Image (cartoon, rainbow, N blue to C red):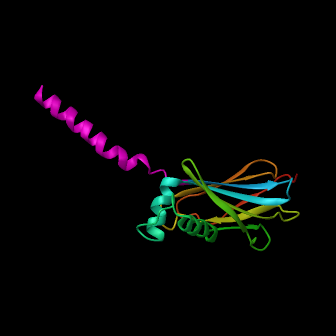
Amino acid sequence: MKKLFIITLALLMTGVFTTPVFAHQLRAAITKVLFNKNTGNLEIMHRFYIHDTEHAAQILFNKTADIRNSTDTQELFANYVAKRFAIKPLNGEELKLKAVGHEIERIYFWVYQEVKAPEDIRGLTMIHNALRDIWTDQINTVNVEGMGELQTATFDGDVELLSVEFTKQQ
């Protein structure tokens, strides 16, 4: 009976001590690239888990960086994301994205960008290295909407450049 108690206690302690370690290890971001027919713009919305941005800010900027309460840190992080995301038409020049803003919404940190949508576009080539220069297991998924079927590009492992092609122009 004593042996069963020790094993049970050991399992409970292992669960108690390892759960917090793995609780925030997702390291995944979602970006939506939207061809907005109403505005004629290409709108980019990056969504990061606030927990990941907190840790990243302390690694990137300084150990006391506070993304939740410091507008300076939020601006630094938004600029960091903007420098690590690039997009261009398949056979064109890189688009000059304009920063629109950033915000914290519950458990997410959002970064917004936009540019006038290119005409007669047949696809996009993208780079999305935000947080991937810090963590090798960071996965950035980009969903492209508004040009036919939803297209998804997933930046995982050593993938740095991905393209999507549009089958139908709308």
The residue depicted at 85 percent of the width and 52 percent of the height is: 168
* Residue pictured at 62% horizontal, 71% vertical: 83
Can the viewer see residue 135? Answer: no
Question: Residue 151: percent from the left, percent from the top?
Answer: 72, 51
User: In the rendering, at what x and y percent does residue 122 appear?
Assistant: 82, 61
- Residue 125, can we see it? yes
Indicate the position of residue 79 as horizontal and vertical percent values: 61, 69
Asked if the magenta segment contains residue 12, the reply would be: yes
Q: Where in the figure is residue 62, as x and y percent of width and height?
A: 44, 71
Is 98 placed above or below 11 here? Answer: below
Q: Main secondary structure of the magenta part?
A: helix
Task: Specify the quadrant that holds the N terminus.
Answer: top left
For residue 170, side relative to residue 69 (left or right)? right
**Is residue 23 left or right of 73 when viewed as pictured?**
left
The residue at the point 48 percent across, 54 percent down is: 51
Q: Nearer the viewer, residue 62 or 90?
A: 62
* Front residue (pair 102, 59): 102
Q: Residue furthest bottom?
A: 93
Specify whether residue 137 is painted magenta: no
Residue interval drawn in magenta: 1-28
State the residue in front, 122 or 53.
53
Question: Would you say 22 lies left or right of 41 here?
Answer: left
Residue under the point 52% across and 60% down: 157
Which residue lies most toward the top here?
1
Q: Picture quarter containing residue 33?
A: bottom right
